Image (spheres, helix red, strand yellow):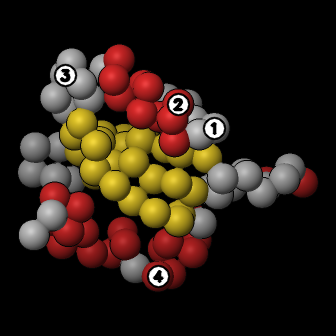
Amino acid sequence: MSILQDVKDKQPGRFTPANKRFFQDCRYAVRYGKHSGERFLLRSTYMWSDMFGGPKTLHYRLNTLKDDLEIGPLVDGAFSTRAEAMRWLREH
């Protein structure tokens, strides 16, 4: 079993099709900070990017993962590309 599956099993309501549609999430992955070893949930998402008439834009967000795999708060800022998110993880 994967850590991502463990995260999904821990909070199944967060990963329902309705919730995924609401937040406009596309994909999920668990990644680690290189220096801290802290776990993060990496999401590719359109989450509210088209608010106020803006274009619908795919971006990447990171949530912290607690020791018990509960999803924690978002890391400040959104990343335009997966590479930017991975660079941030290498620095943390």
Q: Are marks 4 and 2 in contact (CB under 8 Å)?
A: no
Cα distance, mark 2 to mark 3? 18 Å
Decide which of 21, 83 is in the foreground and name it.
Answer: 83
Is 11 drawn above or below residue 91 in the view shown? below
Mark positioned earlier in the residue sequence (2 or 3): 3
Q: Secondary structure at mark 3?
A: loop
Q: Indicate the position of residue 7 as horizontal and vertical percent values.
A: 21, 62
Residue on which disc 1 sits: 80
Residue drawn at (39%, 48%) of the image: 42
Is 46 drawn above or below residue 72 in the view shown? below
Tag on residue 84? 2
Residue drawn at (46%, 63%) of the image: 27
Q: Amino acid at mark 1?
A: Ser
Q: Are marks 2 and 3 in contact (CB under 8 Å)?
A: no
Is 74 drawn above or below residue 20 in the view shown? above
Q: How many marks?
A: 4
Disc 1: CA contacts within 10 A as few (<14), some (14-19) or many (>=20):
some
Cα distance, mark 4 to mark 2? 27 Å
Cα distance, mark 3 to mark 1? 23 Å
Q: Nearer the viewer, mark 4 or mark 1?
A: 1
Q: Amino acid at mark 4?
A: Pro
Q: Amino acid at mark 3?
A: Ser
Residue on which disc 3 sits: 36
Q: Residue 9 occupies which quadrant of the picture?
A: bottom left
Residue drawn at (45%, 53%) of the image: 43
Mark positioned earlier in the residue sequence (3 or 4): 4
Q: Secondary structure at mark 4?
A: helix
Q: Amino acid at mark 2?
A: Glu
Residue on which disc 4 sits: 17
Q: Nearer the viewer, mark 3 or mark 4?
A: 3
Residue drawn at (84%, 53%) of the image: 55
